Amino acid sequence: AQSVTQLDSHVSVSEGTPVLLRCNYSSSYSPSLFWYVQHPNKGLQLLLKYTSAATLVKGINGFEAEFKKSETSFHLTKPSAHMSDAAEYFCVVSEYGNKLVFGAGTILRVKS
Amino acid sequence: GAGVSQSPRYKVAKRGRDVALRCDSISGHVTLYWYRQTLGQGSEVLTYSQSDAQRDKSGRPSGRFSAERPERSVSTLKIQRTEQGDSAVYLCASSPRTGMVYEQYFGPGTRLTVT
């Protein structure tokens, strides 16, 4: 069975400092992994996805994530936070088939 | 271009009543998904439909949830005999292809409150 654990429910960083949002997954097979972002009153937007190609995945808005099979992790990073990055972020896993499993979400706060 | 839209954005229903939530997907997308998002518990897929299938492909065990697709780009999620535990945000998503590995485009959600 698939599951996703986002290790922090809230993360607070200062503008211009690095962002790290942690995600661990469990999956019986080779999973596909995604990060989505949700701004207030907006729909979910795909940031990036891993589908068994390069383990370091680059997404939009300067975000990237590294798939580490040995650690079953898919942490999201950004070198320098911007105020507009403040939102809720969801780590998502999918095995083959038609089911996505979402993590509980991490709220990112960016301080000026 | 136009994205995925959902209506209503907010819905209050009395326990035991039936509700219907609408999703208008992106033209040309073949697969429509419904998710339930609960604060602090993440999101779970409720049902999905592919291509011209009018009925959902998978439903929740309780059977109170079902989705219909009266038009190719329209889906209606029906919840029968609502319970207070059904209070959540219901998200609709569409995808240009079949299979979860492909990008899904999400609507803004409908917040359902069951009193």
Image: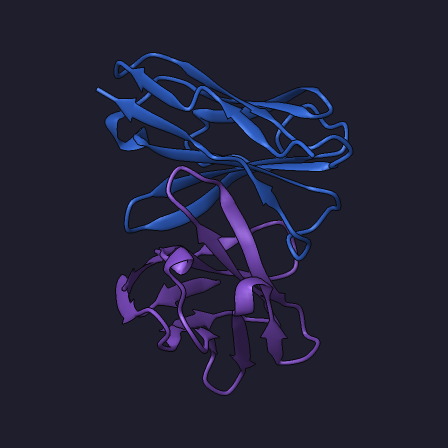
Which of the 4 image quarters holds residue B32? top right
The answer to whether one can see residue B15 in this image is yes
Q: Residue furthest left?
A: B115
Q: Position of residue B113 (x, y in %)?
A: 28, 24
Q: Residue at point 24% right, 27% down? A: B84
- Residue found at x 65% / y 60%: A96
* Number of numbered labels in the structure image: 0
Name the image quarter holding the C terminus of chain A.
bottom left
Q: Nearer the viewer, residue B9 or B87?
A: B9
- The answer to whether A94 appears left or right of B53 in the picture is left
Residue shown at the point (45%, 78%) measured from the top left:
A79
Which chain shows up in blue? B
- Residue A46 in percent (x, y) is at 56, 54
Expressed as whole percent of the image width and height from the top left, the position of residue B17 reads: 33, 12
In the image, which lettered chain appears purple? A
Q: Is residue A11 above or below residue A45?
A: below
Is A100 on the left or on the right of B27, as rendered?
Answer: left
